[in-house]
Amino acid sequence: MNDGWNRREAPDFIEQRLVGAFRAHHRGQRMWRTLAVAGIAAALTAIAWMAWPSRATPPHLAAVKRAPIPSPNAVARRPVQLVPVVASVPRKVRRRRVAPTEVATGFLPLDAAPMPLDGGAVIRMEVPRPTLALFGLPVDARRVSVPVQADVLFGEDGMAHAVRFVSTASYEVPARK
Amino acid sequence: MARDTDNGATFWNFSPPAAESHSERMQRSLADESDSQLLDEASRGSEEAFVELYRRHQGPVFRFALRMSGDEATAEEVVQEVFLTLIRGPVRYAEARGSLTGWLLGVARNHVLRVLERRPPRAPAAEWEAPDASADVLAALLRRESLDAVRRAVLSLPAVYREALVLCDLEELEYAEAARAAGCSLGTIRSRLHRARNLLAAKLTKTRECAL
């Protein structure tokens, strides 16, 4: 049967539009792949950073003074007393909440051979928490669906050069009477 | 390199073959690949593979949508949607279950039916073609009229009969492929096709009687 449309084809502009859509789609995928690779590199660096023994004390712990350790001689001279131990249970400790503090890893280079940067921008974005695992960082299984914040350093060439992960930690201290 | 013999002398022609661009070479090699291979390459980001797939299959998809809707704009929209489905992926096409054309026509059918829910098929506008000076103008007009009558009759069929007729008689798909594209059994597509042909014959006979 012939209805005269046996040779009809779609106009050329549709091919051009679809090729444009194809390019845009795969450009986006490539960007995510780059970020994942960058993430892995950052994770490895983060692990190295955490395993480093002489880390600086976090600012919120700097105020805590270490108790002096008595010398063995002093302990020996002290008379031994037997004192009944009574556990003191505080009735209710009022606590006040302190503003959340950000704790961040250092900037982790994403380039195999880091290049000096003339300029760029740091953009904060949220990445899925399992990304941390790609970097070798521990992932809290209870908060796996909660995204984690990351600062990505983009150079003037538009490429991501470094990343750091930011954690917002809030802690509580007893309220003053 | 070619060998020419003239007057007993032998000449070797070392002139290089006509220059062929990289993309032409690529398209030529892709033309030998199966649809599954092309799909695989396209999903990994090969633009050439996607273009080759598009060029292979856009014709049947466009014609199917045009015949189902009678509207070029709708047909263009459907072609775009079908191939965007390929781009976005993942594609649930299995080569063992039939040709890619059949699968794409199934996707096109879903889009067309969705469009037809919003607006019914419309009679196609008469196409104007410059008359060939050597051709018999009267014969050309009669042919045009009969083609228009066939298109109108096809468009007036209910959608399920129309798609059976378009897939089997106009796109010349095998019954199994047509059944897969239409999402029904082999027996159903056969009975629908039989009914569609009877309806179409009745409509065309009526049209001819009215013209007389």
Image (cartoon, coloured by chain):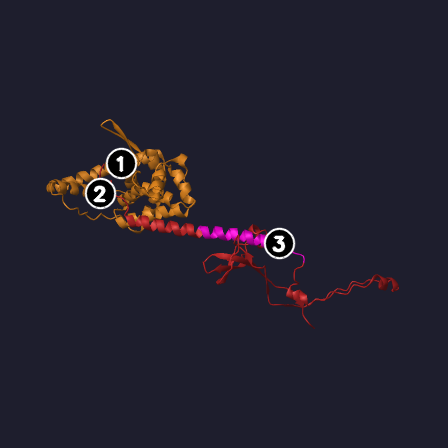
Chain colours: A red, B orange
Q: Which residues are magenta?
A: A29-53
Q: What's the amino acid at mark 3? A: Ala
Read off the chain for label 3. Answer: A
Q: What's the amino acid at mark 2? A: Arg
The answer to if A39 sits in the magenta stretch is yes
Q: Which mark is residue A128?
A: none
Q: Quadrant of the N terminus of chain A?
A: top left
Q: Tell me the residue that label 3 is attached to.
A: A48
Are discs 2 and 3 less than 8 Å apart at CB? no
Q: What's the amino acid at mark 1? A: Asp
* Residue A80 appears anywhere in the view: no
Q: Nearer the viewer, residue B2 or A13?
A: B2
The residue under the point 57% across, 53% down is A43
> Are both tags, 2 and 3, on one chain?
no
Q: Position of residue B29 (x, y in %)?
A: 36, 38
The local crowd at label 2, few if under 14, some if 14 to 19, many if 20 or more residues have their Cα within 10 Å, is many
Q: Which mark is residue B169?
A: 1
Q: Which mark is residue B151?
A: 2
The answer to if A87 sits in the magenta stretch is no
Q: Position of residue B46 (x, y in %)?
A: 40, 45
Q: Nearer the viewer, residue B196 or B19?
A: B19
Q: Nearer the viewer, residue A103 or B75?
A: A103
Read off the chain for label 1. Answer: B
Q: Nearer the viewer, residue B201 or B26?
A: B26
Select label 2 or label 3 by which is in front. Answer: 3
Dot 1: what SS?
helix
Q: Position of residue B122 (x, y in %)?
A: 24, 48
